Image (cartoon, rainbow, N blue to C red):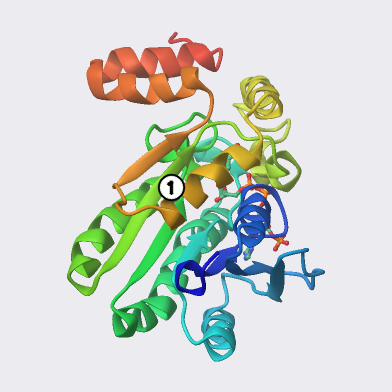
C-alpha cells in the first residue's frame, strides 16, 4: 500500500470479537493500527495494543496523545468497546444502568471529544461507532443495552452534521448477531435471580438470545465492512451487517406499523401479550 493511503487507526475493545477482527484485518492491509484493551495485551502480527478503560477520561486522552505522538495523525477511530447488561428494566439498578451507559455511550463520547480536535486540525477523519440492531429496536431484557445504543445513534447522527464542514465523517454500524465473547462478558442485573418476578421468562429469553449469538456471523464480516469504509470515498449514516434475515427485520421496522413490528420482535423472543 502506498504511504499516502496508509491510515492511522485507533480501535477500542480490540482484545476480542469485532474490535480484534478489525485490528487484524486493517493491520494486515497495511494500515497503522493501535488497538486497546483494559488489560495489558500482546501486540498482534500487524497491530499495536495499548491499555485503555474507556470509562476513564484521562486514560482516553492519554491514549489519543500517545498515538498522535507516535504517528503524527489519527485518521480513523473505531469505537467497539462495549458489553451487554441483561435484565428486566424493573430489575436493573441505577448503578448498573450507569455502568452500561458509562462504557457503551460515555466511552464513545470521551473518545470523540479527545480525537475531534486532532481531526479538525487535520481537516479530515472518520469515526466509526459500533452500534447494534439493539440500537434500532428495543430488545426485551436488554433494555439498558438498547438505551445505550439508541443514545449512540442520536449522538452520531448529530455529530455527523456538526463536523462535516471540517472534512470529518462519522458513521454507525449495526451488527446483528456476531459470534464473539459477548456472551462471556454479558452482565446480568443483580436482581434478575430467582427472586425476580421476571426470572423464568428472562432466563428463557436469554437462552434464545445466546443461541442466536452462537449462530451469528463471524466478526471478520463486520471487519470487512469497516475496511470498506476506511478505504472508501463516501460514508453513509449507518450500515447494517449480519444475517440477511436480521437485516430484513431492521428494514421492516421502517415499513410496518410500530405495534406489528413489536409483535414480531416479541414473537422472536418467545413473548406474547396476556
Ligand atoms: N457480538 C454481537 O452479537 C454484537 C452485536 C451487535 C453489536 N455488538 C457490539 O460490538 C461491540 C464489540 O462487541 P463484541 O461482540 O466484539 O464483544 P466482545 O468479544 O465481548 O469484546 C468486547 C471488547 O470491549 C472491550 N471492553 C469492554 N469494556 C470496556 C471498557 N470499559 N473499556 C475498554 N474496553 C472495554 C473488551 O476489552 P477488555 O475486556 O480487554 O478491556 C473487548 O475487547 C460492542 O459495542 C457490542 O455492543 C456486538
Identify the residue shown where x is 41% and y is 68%.
109
Quarter of the picture containing the N terminus is bottom right
Q: Quadrant of residue 136?
A: top left
Residue extending furthest toward the right:
42
Ligand 1 has an atom within 8 Å of the beta carbon of the residue at disc 1: yes
* Disc 1, SS: helix
Question: Compared with residue 184, is residue 196 higher up or lower down, i.e. above or below?
Answer: above
Q: Quadrant of the C terminus?
A: top left
Q: Nearer the viewer, residue 183 or 37?
A: 37
* Pointer 1 local density, CA inside 10 Å: few below 14, some 14–19, many at least 20: many
- The residue indicated by pointer 1 is 149
Name the residue at the front extreme.
2
Q: Is residue 214 visible?
A: yes
Image coords of residue 135 (percent x, y): 41, 41
Measuring from the top left, give residue 141's x and y in whole percent.
54, 32
- In this rendering, position of residue 82 left or right of residue 39: left
Q: Residue at x 53, y 68 (%)?
A: 9
Q: Nearer the viewer, residue 158 or 269?
A: 158
Q: Image quadrant of residue 58?
A: bottom right
181 or 260: which is nearer to us? 181
Between 143 and 58, which is closer to the camera in this rendering? 58
| Position of residue 215 in the picture relative to residue 60 (left or right) | right
The residue located at (61%, 68%) in the rendering is 33
Amino acid at each position: 500500500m502506498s504511504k499516502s493511503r496508509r491510515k492511522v487507526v485507533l480501535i477500542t475493545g480490540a482484545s476480542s470479537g469485532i474490535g480484534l477482527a478489525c485490528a487484524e484485518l486493517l493491520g494486515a492491509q497495511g494500515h497503522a493500527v493501535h488497538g486497546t484493551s483494559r488489560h495489558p495485551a500482546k501486540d498482534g502480527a500487524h497491530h499495536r495494543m495499548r491499555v485503555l478503560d474507556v470509562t476513564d477520561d484521562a486514560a482516553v486522552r492519554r491514549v489519543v496523545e500517545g498515538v498522535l505522538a507516535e504517528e503524527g495523525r489519527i485518521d480513523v477511530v473505531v469505537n467497539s468497546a462495549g458489553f451487554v447488561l441483561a435484565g428486566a428494566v424493573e430489575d436493573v439498578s441505577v448503578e448498573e444502568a450507569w455502568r452500561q451507559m458509562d462504557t457503551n455511550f460515555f466511552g464513545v463520547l470521551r473518545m470523540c471529544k479527545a480525537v475531534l480536535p486532532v481531526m479538525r486540525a487535520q481537516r479530515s477523519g472518520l469515526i466509526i461507532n459500533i452500534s447494534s440492531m439493539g440500537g434500532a429496536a428495543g430488545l426485551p431484557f436488554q433494555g439498558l443495552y438498547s438505551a445505550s445504543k439508541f443514545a449512540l445513534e442520536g449522538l452520531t447522527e448529530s455529530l455527523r452534521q456538526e463536523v462535516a464542514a471540517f472534512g470529518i465523517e462519522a458513521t454507525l454500524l449495526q451488527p446483528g448477531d456476531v459470534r464473539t465473547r459477548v456472551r462471556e462478558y454479558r452482565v446480568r442485573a443483580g436482581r434478575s435471580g430467582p427472586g425476580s418476578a421476571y426470572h423464568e421468562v428472562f432466563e428463557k429469553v436469554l437462552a434464545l438470545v445466546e443461541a442466536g449469538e452462537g449462530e451469528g456471523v463471524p466478526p471478520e464480516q463486520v471487519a470487512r465492512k469497516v475496511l470498506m469504509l476506511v478505504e472508501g470515498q463516501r460514508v453513509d449514516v449507518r450500515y447494517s451487517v449480519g444475517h440477511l434475515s436480521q437485516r430484513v427485520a431492521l428494514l421492516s421496522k421502517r415499513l410496518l406499523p410500530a405495534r406489528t413490528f413489536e409483535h414480531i420482535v416479541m414473537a422472536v423472543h418467545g413473548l406474547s401479550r396476556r
